Image (cartoon, rainbow, N blue to C red):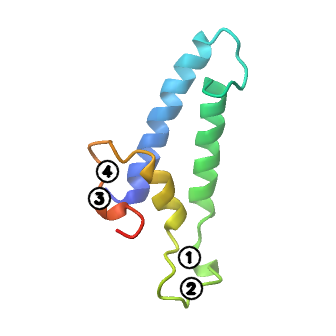
Amino acid sequence: MDITDFLEARITEDEAEASVAKAEFAHGGYGCYGPARVLAECAAKRAIIAGIIPERDPQAGNPDYDPLWVIRELAAVYKDHPDYRKEWAIGG
């Protein structure tokens, strides 16, 4: 499992939990921690993952630039998950 597979699996888990909660959520709004917000966040994460195309990276020639920094930041949210690898951390 690579970092993208890991992140996709966590997003899928979040979506499943939020979908169940949305059905039970009395207000159905975009509360700070409401299921609608979680589902919107999941969609945004998927869009970010899909949009990262290293071939279009304007800093591709910079050896210090990590084109996967966004993926690393998104995955860091799940750093306490048992499948998270420490080498995925920023600067890891």
Q: CB of mark 4 within 8 Å of CB of mark 3?
A: yes
Please name the residue that numbered disc 1 is placed on: 54
Q: CA distance from mark 3 to mark 1?
A: 23 Å
Percent coordinates x, y for residue 12 in the rendering: 47, 38
Mark 3 or 2, closer to the camera: 3
Secondary structure beneath disc 2? loop
Q: Secondary structure at mark 3?
A: helix
Q: For mark 4, does the 10 Å Cα neighbourhood hold few (<14), some (14 to 19), or many (20 or more) residues? A: some
Q: Which residue is mark 3?
A: 86
Q: Quadrant of the C terminus?
A: bottom left
**Amino acid type at mark 2:** Ala
Graded by Cα atoms within 10 Å as few (under 14), some (14 to 19) or many (20 or more), the crowding at tag 1 reads few
Mark 4 or mark 1: whose residue is earlier in sequence: 1
Q: Residue at horizontal 60%, vertical 27%?
A: 33
Q: Is residue 66 toward the left or the right of residue 32 in the image?
A: left
Residue tagged 4: 84
Residue 54 in percent (x, y) is at 56, 76
Q: Is residue 35 above or below residue 40?
A: above
User: 7 left or right of 20?
Assistant: left
